[in-house]
Image (cartoon, grey):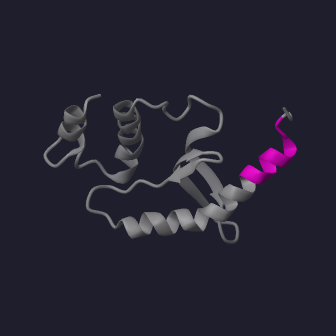
Amino acid sequence: MTPQQFIAKWGPGGPAHELNERQGAQPHFIDLCQLLGVPTPGSAGDYIFEQDTLVLGEARGYADVFMRNHFAWENKAPGRNLDTALKQLLTYSLALILSSVQVETNNPRPSS
């Protein structure tokens, strides 16, 4: 995908611009990966869409994209408050980190 194609699709007036968060999060991220020439979620076991995690209490939260030991991504529809996305990720971050540590502890990497 070229930058022009990405902008034409996702920019104001583009066919995907008016999608809500649920409709647009995954296709937007896939297009972004294609634009940047990097792998998409699902290409590796710990790189996925909709990583669920426990947050305070028994509530569940979902990081829109998660790559263990690298990043978590929370998408918002155009015009939405990105502070909300940051707050969501901060709420999930400890649980995501702890799940990464637990996986590493249960499946240690071979020493070189």
Outermost residue, left direction?
13
Please indicate whether residue 24 sits to the left or right of residue 62 in the image: left
Give the quarter of the image for residue 38: top left
Residue range corresponding to the magenta coloring: 100-109
Q: Look at the image and tell me in which quarter the N terminus lies.
A: top left
Splitting the image into 4 quarters, where does residue 112 fall? Answer: top right
- Kindly identify the residue that appears in the image at 48 percent across and 32 percent down: 40
Residue 55 lies, with reference to residue 43, above or below; the image says below
* Nearer-the-camera pick, 70 or 81: 70
* Magenta portion: prevailing SS class: helix
Residue in the foreground of this view, choosing between 21 and 96: 96
Residue at figure coordinates x 82%, y 37% from the top left: 109
| Vertical side of 86 occupied by 4: above or below | above
Q: Position of residue 76 (x, y in %)?
A: 37, 57
Q: Is residue 101 left or right of residue 71?
A: right
Q: Is residue 92 magenta?
A: no
Q: Residue 14: x and y, percent?
A: 17, 42
Seen in the image, is 46 located left or right of residue 63?
Answer: right
